[in-house]
Amino acid sequence: MNTQLHSNALHELDRQHFVHPVSSWQGHEARGVRILKSAKGATVTDSEGRQLLDGFAGLWCVNAGYGHESVVEAAAEQMRRLPYATGYFDLGSEAPIKLAAELADRAPGDLNHIFFTLGGSDAVDSTIRFVRYYWHSKGQPNKDQYISVEQGYHGSTSAGAGLTALPAFHDGFGVPFNWQHKIPSHYLYRNPVGSDPATVIAASVAALRAKVAELGQERVAAFYVEPIQGSSGVLVPPKGWIKAMRDTCAELDILFIADEVITGFGRTGPMFACEEEGIVPDMMTTAKGLTSGYSPMGAVFLSDHVYQTIAEGAGPKAVGHGFTYSAHPVSAVVALEVLKLYEGGLFENGIKMGDRLQKGLAGLSDHPLVGDVRGRGMLAAIELVTDKDKKTPVPAELQAATRLFDRAWDNGLIIRAFPQGVFGFAPPLCCTADEIDAIVDRTKQVLDLTL
Ligand code: PLP
């Protein structure tokens, strides 16, 4: 295809043929798309030549920032030498083996076994299957009920979408299934039990216990959490929440699965957000920052006991789960290279810049439209209201995600606009102090325009 295609023609082709993920099919036909052409550091350039600060790191994935030649070179070299090697049937290649070892080395506790996927959704889906296999292997096949948290997001595969608790991923799709259950979110700003951390934690623990009692402890297989709920608008639990939930699962003999697809790889400061409370999940899912978006890859981390139980349960038989592109060698070298960048200064910079971002956004709290500012590290959100005391959500026409997004875009900033009038931020960890300040300043300008 002619790459110099006039952008109007490209828009037309897009309208006619490209089915966009998580987009309004009808709206997209009417509005057309914004097309990105190139990027460097934290700045992207669109097809009109406009430069924008990427305050959302693509889709909270380009943690290292754009344009790292070392990553490009490593991928090109791997493509030339061995573009593909399967991991099936006890075959393998060097890069995924090295990557698995490097990841296990950095993982919390005994999460020593790594299963590679293509992204986050199939990582979550893989855990759903591993959980079932685990309980079968333990001689408890009736443990087949799964619990997750309202307002959570765990991807959009057939099974994972039912653990997700966002209406757009359910309506019309026939999920959740009857083995998928929810407990209320910790959502501090709008929690019916109030915002006192101890009360919120106690309420979540009580809700989990009640749900397990209702289903029968002998039926409950696993509980899924995001250390910070991303896709519902960056809902940060009170300190101690995740540990309390982990401890409750251990006590009730339920597998605890931490979904670190967004929070992994320095997004909130440490390598994994679970580390903040010193907890070790039974399994952990990651993707996004693993390759920093340079190529697709996800990883499921399995603890020693989960791995051994499944291995013993299967005996000499193959554990029948995998994908043609599991452990893709090109993605694996990309991940190894990205890891070097993270540990060569990007994590450190992310911690400093995360602090600056949180302080900068906290400075917007006095703005008449800002009801709540929340976040940790390079992950943050502000929630807009029209009445701060009553926490009145902004009107529906402003809540429409596209409206806020468009205003930010016209102001040279890419952010995520969540439906309830929430701005989300997840800048690349490579941002400079000036870029963080610009993200905050431009956000303020957008708020002023919205008044
Ligand atoms: N889990 C969480 C917590 C996520 O935020 C996402 C994506 O945003 C997923 C799973 C799904 O990942 P992917 O979009 O790579 O399939």
Image (cartoon, rainbow, N blue to C red):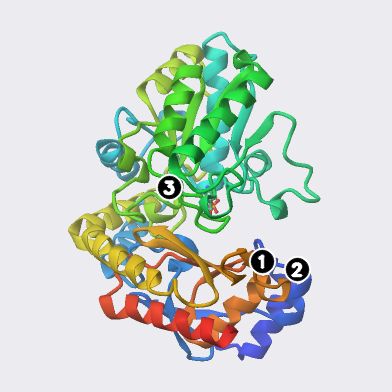
Q: Residue 331: x and y, percent?
A: 39, 53
Q: Secondary structure at mark 2?
A: helix
Q: In the rendered view, would you say 39 is above or below 269?
A: below
Residue 130 image position (x, y, % from top left): 53, 27
Q: Image height check: is 306 above or below 80?
A: above
Lower sequence index among marks 3 and 2: 2
Residue at the disc numbered 1: 20
Q: Which residue is mark 2?
A: 25
Q: Place residue 209 in its image quadrant.
A: top right
- Report if residue 114 is visible in the image: yes
Q: Residues within 10 Å of mark 2 (few under 14, many from 20)?
A: few
Q: Residue at x 36, y 62 (%)?
A: 378
Q: Identify the element where label 1 is drawn.
A: loop
Q: Is residue 211 above or below residue 367?
A: above
**Kind of residue at badge 3:** His
Residue drawn at x 38%, y 43% is 239
Disc 1 and disc 2 in contact, CB within 8 angstroms: yes
* Mark with earlier residue (1, 2): 1
Q: Which residue is mark 3?
A: 328
Q: Amino acid at mark 2?
A: Trp
Image quadrant assignment for residue 353? bottom left
Apparent side of residue 88 relative to residue 239 in the rendered image (left or right): right
Residue 192 as seen in the image, left or right of residue 436:
right
| Nearer to the camera, 363 or 258 | 363
Which residue is at the far top?
139
**Contact flag, marks 3 and 2 (Cβ < 8 Å):** no
Residue lying furthest left: 344
The amino acid sitting under disc 1 is: His
Q: Residues within 10 Å of mark 3 (few under 14, many from 20)?
A: many
* Label 1 CA crowd tier, 10 Å (few <14, some 14–19, many 20+): few
Earlier in the chain: of badge 3 and badge 1, it is 1
